[in-house]
């Protein structure tokens, strides 16, 4: 359960995506100074880095890489830049999760769900899924991060201890503005929010971590990603895109990457098609240093497979040539489960009168 209704009154701290400049300096689309490319013809032949996907990670990486003013980066995004209250309003709920700005992907029938299919929703716009999600700020459990690290070595920094400094760096905690709350005489009674929490205490084995960022599973309150000054969603676009003016940072939108180019097993560039009416021309751009796939948990492995990287048997069955036989690509996708519950209690007229 979210405390969004409390956070709008300044009674709950909010978390913001880290940014190179204060959010107060960020500007709306009409004022953006970022160098947008109007079409694929403006794309340079090569860049130091080519990033596929202008989502949560893609924009963050692009911002960091171009901060020196010298390293050249091209970000290729399938969606477009969107300004809408359905995205920016803090309390719009799931209004932005429709098919307009997101991929609606249905899973194959799941054996353990009585062969039902489930929907996987992913953002299809500048900002990615951080532009359409519920703004919940929850870290994974320490066991999950440590399991990642164990695949490499016992001393791998891909672990809870190794990643925690970066998890902290990515966020800025903004404490409640007590003065504002007091000036308009806004108060709340915690007892109205405690019933659900207390109910979970009757369930054996349920833990109550002190904070959502403690790295433990259990029951807890969580803050939301928001800009407290504007009372708007804080996401990858506002943190790492708006208001940035760098000649070494190019972005092309409404463009679909069809293939990663490989030379002797090394990624050297990509091929993409820009959505422009019925145009079918392809554009090739080279990466002097690296190609960075940041197209999400579904589309990144899909692009790898279409580029010949993945399980050989699967690629051959789809009529694709295998460049790198890598069995793990496209396997073992796991999404976090979400269960909504409601409790209905019938009251007799006698009870109501009392």
Image (spheres, grey):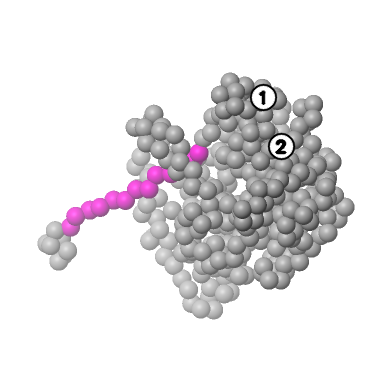
- Point 60% across, 23% down: residue: 316
Q: Residue furthest right?
A: 70
Position of 104 compared to 73: left or right? Answer: left
Q: Residue at x 86, y 55 (%)?
A: 69
Q: Callout 1: few (<14), some (14-19), or many (20+) C-alpha neighbours within 10 Å?
A: some
Q: Which residues are magenta?
A: 335-347
Residue 346, located in which quarter of the rendered image? Answer: bottom left
Which image quarter: residue 351? bottom left
- Residue 20 is situated, as x and y percent measured from the top left of the image, at 76, 59
**Near-viewer residue (300 or 257):** 257
Residue 283 location (% of width, % of height)? 74, 46
Q: Residue 89 appears at what percent x and percent y?
A: 53, 66
Check residue 49 for magenta coloring: no
Eyeballing the image, is 239 above or below 330?
A: below
What is the x, y in percent for residue 211? 54, 48
Residue position for label 1 = 322
Q: Earlier in the sequence, mark 2 or mark 1?
A: 2
Say which of 192 and 92 sits in front: 92
Q: Residues within 10 Å of mark 2 (few under 14, many from 20)?
A: many
Indicate left or right for 79 with 188 as reference: right
Instruction: Give the numbered dot on residue 10.
Output: none
- Mark sitting on residue 260: 2
């Amino acid at each position: 359960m979210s405390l969004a209704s409390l956070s709008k009154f300044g009674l709950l701290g909010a978390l913001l995506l880290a940014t190179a400049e204060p959010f107060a300096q960020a500007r709306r689309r009409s004022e953006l100074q970022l160098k947008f490319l109007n079409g694929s013809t403006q794309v340079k032949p090569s860049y130091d880095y080519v990033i596929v996907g202008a989502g949560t990670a893609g924009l963050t990486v692009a911002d960091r890489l171009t901060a020196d003013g010298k390293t050249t980066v091209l970000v290729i995004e399938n969606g477009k830049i969107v300004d809408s209250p359905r995205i920016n309003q803090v309390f719009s709920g799931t209004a932005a999760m429709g098919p307009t700005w997101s991929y609606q992907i249905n899973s194959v029938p799941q054996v353990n769900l009585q062969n039902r299919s489930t929907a996987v929703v992913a953002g299809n716009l500048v900002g990615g899924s951080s532009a359409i999600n519920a703004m919940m700020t929850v870290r994974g459990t320490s066991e999950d991060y440590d399991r990642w690290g164990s695949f490499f070595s016992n001393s791998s920094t891909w672990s809870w201890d190794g990643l925690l400094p970066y998890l902290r760096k990515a966020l800025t905690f903004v404490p409640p503005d007590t003065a504002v709350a007091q000036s308009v005489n806004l108060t709340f009674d915690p007892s109205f929010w405690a019933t659900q929490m207390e109910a979970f205490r009757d369930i054996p084995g349920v833990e109550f971590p002190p904070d959502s960022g403690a790295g433990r599973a259990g029951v807890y309150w969580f803050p939301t990603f928001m800009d407290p000054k504007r009372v708007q969603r804080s996401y990858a676009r506002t943190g790492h895109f708006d208001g940035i003016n760098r000649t070494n940072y190019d972005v092309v939108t409404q463009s679909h990457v069809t293939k990663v180019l490989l030379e002797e097993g090394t990624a050297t560039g990509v091929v993409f098609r820009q959505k422009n009416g019925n145009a079918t021309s392809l554009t090739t751009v080279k990466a002097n240093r690296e190609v960075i796939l940041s197209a999400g948990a579904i589309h990144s492995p899909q692009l790898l497979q279409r580029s010949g990287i993945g399980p050989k048997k699967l690629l051959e069955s789809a009529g694709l040539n295998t460049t790198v036989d890598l069995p793990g690509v496209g396997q073992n996708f796991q999404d976090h489960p979400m269960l909504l519950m409601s409790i209905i209690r019938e009251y007799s007229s006698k009870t109501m009168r009392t």
